[in-house]
Image: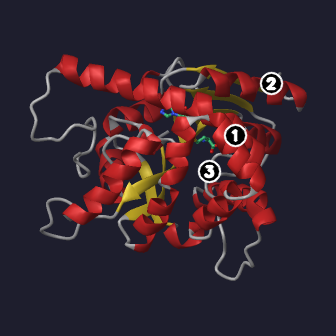
């Protein structure tokens, strides 16, 4: 699997793909993602809660397992601060899209925080249904709604949203150019776009690709977590530049998420974790088995936890 190509499918760049092959691969990937989250989201919610993303930890935080929810909320808040999203009643976001929304944790948080209307999309019917049920249970049904839709072909008109939010979904996107183009299309003039995602390390000058041992780690993670080719943070920045977006900023938060996977593994190995995992099915078990590789990937500096933000010109 090529890990340096931007905007391609999970097939090696050396193989010539017809458009039909490419489409078939993308359909297969989408089906895998939908089934993976259909199967595993209940288990995740049961042992870990409504947010399906990393927590953000400051280096002086005492990391406690019970702290995972506040670390996940901190991730949302840190991302908003990094992107300078305004709390000012005049300037705060009023319409938000949550691209790759999971069971809607971010949407409900953002809708509550800003009093905004929020639309979430996911490939997983189980997630969309659960997200809507949680919104109704929390009295947010008039503010937030969730549907099954493809981030690469969003069911929204141009220029609809003043905050475009993608929390840990970009890594699933087989065509990064199409992904950021769609984020840009649905953004209103002046809107903020926030992408928090897994990347591979930036290549060094003269390097054409990652080292084989690095590719090996990523490939194993790809097949268990239904990910296509990875790209680097610099690749995202280049794509955003090519779309003439403004105030493009990025940061490496790998150090701030380091306690996350050890904490997830510890929870998964609890009695509740093991029984939930076994009940949930093979795809979830396969996902759990590559968690140590995430730790290895971060330690070896090949995986980067990145935030990339920008604004659409007025
Ligand atoms: N942002 C959520 C969930 C992250 S998990 C949270 O932080 O809690 C990744 C999510 O991306 C899943 O909901 C999955 O269905 C979604 N996803 C992956 N590929 C997608 C695509 N092509 N279109 C829409 N959603 C996608």
The residue that mark 1 highlights is 43
Q: In this orientation, does residue 192 appear?
A: no
* Residue lying at 39% horizontally and 56% vertically, measured from the top left: 199
Q: Determine which quarter of the picture holds residue 93.
A: top right
- Which of 287 and 4 lies nearest the eye of the viewer? 287
Query: Which quadrant would the N terminus be assigned to in this image?
Result: top left
Q: Residues within 10 Å of mark 3 (few under 14, many from 20)?
A: many
The residue that mark 2 highlights is 133
Q: Position of residue 158 (x, y in %)?
A: 49, 22
Q: Residues within 10 Å of mark 2 (few under 14, many from 20)?
A: some
Q: Work out how far the residue at label 2 is from the one at label 3, CA to CA, in angstroms.
A: 20 Å
* Residue lying at 43% horizontally and 50% vertically, measured from the top left: 246
Q: Position of residue 190 (x, y in %)?
A: 54, 40
Q: Position of residue 113 (x, y in %)?
A: 80, 45
Tag on residue 53?
3
Rendered position, 22 above or below 244 = above
* Residue lying at 23% horizontally and 25% vertically, measured from the top left: 22
Ligand 1: quadrant of the figure: top right
Q: Work out how far the residue at label 1 is from the one at label 2, CA to CA, in angstroms.
A: 17 Å
Sequence order check: which comes first, mark 1 or mark 2?
1
Assign a secondary structure to mark 1: helix
Q: Position of residue 213 (x, y in %)?
A: 25, 64
Query: Does label 3 point to a residue whose CB lies under 8 Å from ligand 1?
Result: yes
Sequence order check: which comes first, mark 3 or mark 1?
1
* Residue lying at 85% horizontally and 29% vertically, measured from the top left: 140
Assign a secondary structure to mark 3: loop
- Which of 105 and 184 lies nearest the eye of the viewer? 105
| Residue 281 relative to residue 67: left or right | left
């Amino acid at each position: 699997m090529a890990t340096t190509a931007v905007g391609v499918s999970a097939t090696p760049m050396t193989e010539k793909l017809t458009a039909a092959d490419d489409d078939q691969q993308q359909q297969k990937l989408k089906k895998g993602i939908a089934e993976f989250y259909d199967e595993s989201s209940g288990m995740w919610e049961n042992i870990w809660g409504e947010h399906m993303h990393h927590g953000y930890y400051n280096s002086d935080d005492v990391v406690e397992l019970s702290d995972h929810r506040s670390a996940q909320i901190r991730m949302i808040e840190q991302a908003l601060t990094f992107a300078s999203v305004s709390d000012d009643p005049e300037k705060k976001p009023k319409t938000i899209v949550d691209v790759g929304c999971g069971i809607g944790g971010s949407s409900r948080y953002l809708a509550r925080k800003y009093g905004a209307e929020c639309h979430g999309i996911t490939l997983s019917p189980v997630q969309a249904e659960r997200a809507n049920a949680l919104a109704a249970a929390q009295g947010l049904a008039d503010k937030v709604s969730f549907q099954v839709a493809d981030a690469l072909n969003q069911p929204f008109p141009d220029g609809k949203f003043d905050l475009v939010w993608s929390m840990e979904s970009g890594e699933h996107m087989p065509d990064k150019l199409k992904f950021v183009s769609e984020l840009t299309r649905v953004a209103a003039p002046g809107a903020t776009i926030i992408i928090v995602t897994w990347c591979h390390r930036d290549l060094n000058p003269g390097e054409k690709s990652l080292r084989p041992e690095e590719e090996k780690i990523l490939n194993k993670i790809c097949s268990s977590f239904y990910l296509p080719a990875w790209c680097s943070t610099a690749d995202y920045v280049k794509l955003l530049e090519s779309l003439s977006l403004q105030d493009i900023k990025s940061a490496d938060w790998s150090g701030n998420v380091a306690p996350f996977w050890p904490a997830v593994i510890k929870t998964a190995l609890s009695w509740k974790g093991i029984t939930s995992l076994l009940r949930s099915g093979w795809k979830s078990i396969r996902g759990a088995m590559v968690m140590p590789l995430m730790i290895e990937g971060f330690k070896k500096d090949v995986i980067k936890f990145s935030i990339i933000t920008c604004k659409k010109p007025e």
